[in-house]
Image: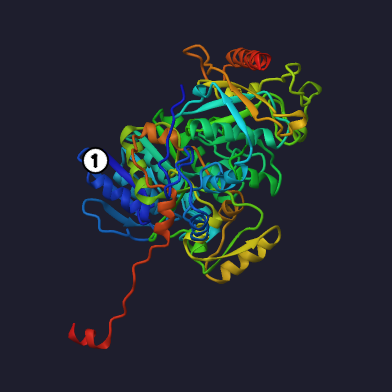
Amino acid sequence: MRVLVTGMGGELGTRVAQLLEARTDVDDVAGCDFVPPRRRLHRAQFTRIDPRDHGRLTQFVVDFAPDAVAHFGVYEPHSRMAPNDAAHATESCTVHALSAAASTGRLERVVVRSGLEVYGRGRGHALVPDERAPLAPTSPYGRSCLDVESVSAALGRRLDIPVAALRYAVVAGSHVPSPLGRLLRLPVVPVPALADPPFVLLDQEDAARSMVEALVRGFDGPLNVVGPGATSPWQAVSLGNRVPMPVAGLGWSLACRTAELAGAPVPPHVLELMRYGSVGDGGRAVDELALGFMVPTQEVLADLYEWATVTPITERARSIA
Amino acid sequence: MNSVQRVAPNYGIDADRVLGSDTPIDALRRRVGGRYAVDEFGGDPHLTDVLALTATPLRVRVEHEENIPRTGPALLVANRGLGVIEPVVLALAVRRAAHRRLRVIGAPELPIIGPALRKIGAIGYRPDDVAALLRAGHLAAAPLSPSWMRGGGGGGWLGRPSSRETPSSVSTRGVGEPPRALLAATLGFPVIPVAVRPGGPVGLPLRPWRVVVGEPMLPPTGTESDDPLAAAEISEAVRNAVHDLLADM
């Protein structure tokens, strides 16, 4: 199997490439992204391409002629790109990488990254949606994920191949760049004054495993992938030893501006999570992909606050070295 | 049949089973340190444990408690949904008889009240959310008739009740309409009829509250989820079972 990993420069893309390298049924792995991979890769071939560069991206995919695509070219606003750039890069990478892969005539399966944001949040939306719940995103990132799912599903119908959409909970961890992680690590964290909605997190290793399993099994359809259990803004703040700042109504606008000034911009889907929660029923993914043990949400949260202790090197030690 | 997912205890607290409770000082330490469990439905079992202590004086007599499953999901359908005490009584009955937490269906989508009720284990009236709750292996309770704030089969006052759904008295007349939409979404899980009778007139605690638990019911093998005919049949069967339990009390 020849696998193309779009968005290979991210934490998840790199880890998926590593897991694919270790499999004997995967012959070749190639990937592209606008930043280099975050870990050492042995067999995988990486090419640095901006996802908005249509020509280079198409040529690269056509030259590689993949059998399978693991599509991680879905960029979360304020994760590694500004919101407008992220939406543009996601659209460009999805349309051009997938259509180029289809044009080679060798494509057999596709798995795309999506998010629980496709269900939307707030009044009238299911609290714990499963895969059959109506899709009504209420944030730009949710709409972006839904576009990715729509484009890939259309491709699947055209070529009559399985297309899986993995609707991830927020992937968090001490090394994963995410706007939610930055917000929760601020010394003072805005929390809802009149509620404490639950949200789920996903460990990056579980996210990578689920992508590989969906790819290898040729799963067709959407799956929610979430960590077991849940947490809430107030609990997160307590566990991280942060100071809670209760906010309500119009105060959120001011809180978001202040957080942005403090280095943690809050995109609409993260604000939605803090105000209304973000949960999904992940039981089907566990069964279909045989995921077994998954890291509980509260352990993922604890990992978010784990930082290696930095010990400054003294002048004496430096001279000895 | 729906598959059931189970979650391991978090910080020693299980979202379904009552494993034990902290001393007040330990409980306070837990809250401050954030070392408590939160479940996907917004429930805070640690807070429920703390609040359960305040309901200790409430006297409840449970009959046929062996019909409450010790593990796994089930939907309890009770005859009353009149007020605040009845769900507390039912939750206490389940807690004392089966050492499990009961999730009461019908938390309103209102600011402050809704989140507060969900925090102590209630859940909103959305059939797909209730189905998710049962798939997660919980015990849920739905009223046959709606209350003034908790939506029943067709919604409470906050959800446009019909004249037939007006809260009934404790007599066997007007037991209420079974929550058919809920039963359709949760087909495949056991449904347990329950009759609740207060200890005195207008809920006064003159005698212990009586909770009689009926035998679990299941639709015929091979019934598809969302089958409206099967939902109507089981709905009728539950209504009759609750009626019979009340008549025998």
Side of B75 relative to A34 (left or right)? right
Q: Quadrant of the N terminus of chain A?
A: top left
* Image spot of residue B117 (x, y percent): 64, 43
Image point (75%, 18%), residue name: B174
Position of residue B179 relative to residue B32, above or below, is above
Of all chains, the one bearing label 1 is: A
How many other residues sit within 10 Å of disc 1, few (<14), some (14-19) or many (≥20)?
Answer: some
Image point (39%, 58%), residue name: A303
Position of residue B192 relative to residue A72, above or below, is above
Q: Would residue A173 be visible to someone looking at this image?
A: yes
* Image spot of residue A158 (x, y percent): 45, 30
Q: Which residue is mark 1?
A: A26
Image point (64%, 17%), residue name: B242
Position of residue A117 relative to residue B104, above or below, is below
Q: Would residue A179 be visible to someone looking at this image?
A: no
* Image spot of residue A236 (x, y percent): 50, 57
Position of residue A161 relative to residue A45, above or below, is above
Q: Please, what secondary structure does the residue beneath circle 1 have?
A: loop
Side of A199 relative to A13 (left or right)? right
- Residue at the limit of the structure toward the front, as seen here: B206
Residue toward you, A207 or A243? A243
Side of A256 relative to B82 (left or right)? left
Residue toward you, A317 or A52? A317
